Amino acid sequence: MSTRGPYAKGVERRREILDAALRVIAAEGYAGATVAAIADAVQMSSNGLLHYFASKDELLVEALRRRDELDSGGVDEHALAASLDDHDPTLDELAEPLLAVVRRNAESAGLVRLFAHLATEGVDDGHAAHDFFAERYARLRRMLATAVARLQQSGSVRADVEPEQAAALVLAAIDGLQAQWLYDDSVDMPAHLSALLRLLSTPESR
């Protein structure tokens, strides 16, 4: 029992730091998200903050992980599959959560820049972001492929669509649209993603 109190406090303190980091990134942008700025937001010293994270890169990666947790509401691929098995689902039940995330991203260029920056640097095996992005893409491909296959059973998605390919293409579209939006914020990410998802639907479900 003596170790649980300090451990729980440490977990809560990390969560507070990550939530503060997300606020700083949203307000100040990726460039303004310095260790000093994040530490100041939680009334800590920079050295004190780095007691909880090995490096700034690790802190930012964990902030992205926290952002995913908040966006998903804790829903994983098993929960999504179970919810789609409850009835005959429609494509809208897959589209709406995806579009909601894209709309929220459009309100925070700083977080989108952080994601794009770390996704690029994370291709190096030794980078702090490498495992996060490798696991994230694998998990999201599984989730989307499972959902597409279930929607094919209900007649909402075309039978000639390969679920794994559709999953990879949807993720590529989301990341690609975000990159284009960073260069030109007139790019309507939700509208373009909706158009892609409509291409997956059967004529009867449109």
Image (tube, grey):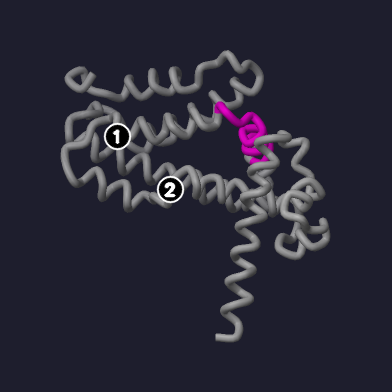
Q: Quadrant of residue 153?
A: top left
Task: Give the quadrant of the N terminus.
Answer: bottom right
Tell me the kind of residue under disc 1.
Answer: Glu
Q: Quadrant of residue 44?
A: bottom right
Q: Is residue 96 left or right of residue 139?
A: left
Q: Please give the name of the residue rendered at 68% of the width and 39% of the height, measured from the top-left corner.
A: 25
In the drawing, what numbered circle is on residue 135? none
Tell me the kind of residue under disc 2.
Answer: Gly
Alpha carbon distance from label 2 to label 1: 15 Å
Task: Find the magenta span and give its range.
Answer: 106-118
* N-term mark: 2 or 1: 2
Percent x, y for residue 110? 67, 33
In the drawing, what numbered circle is on residue 93? 1
Q: Nearer the viewer, mark 2 or mark 1?
A: 2
Q: Is residue 39 left or right of residue 186?
A: right
Question: Circle 2 sits on which residue?
Answer: 73
Q: Please give the name of the residue rendered at 69% of the width and 35% of the height, measured from the top-left corner.
A: 27
- 78 vs 23, nearest the viewer: 23
- 76 vs 160, nearest the viewer: 76
Percent x, y for residue 94? 33, 35
Majority secondary structure of magenta residues:
helix
Q: Quadrant of residue 143?
A: top left
For label 2, count other residues whose C-alpha is less than 10 Å away and answer few (under 14), some (14-19) or many (20+): few
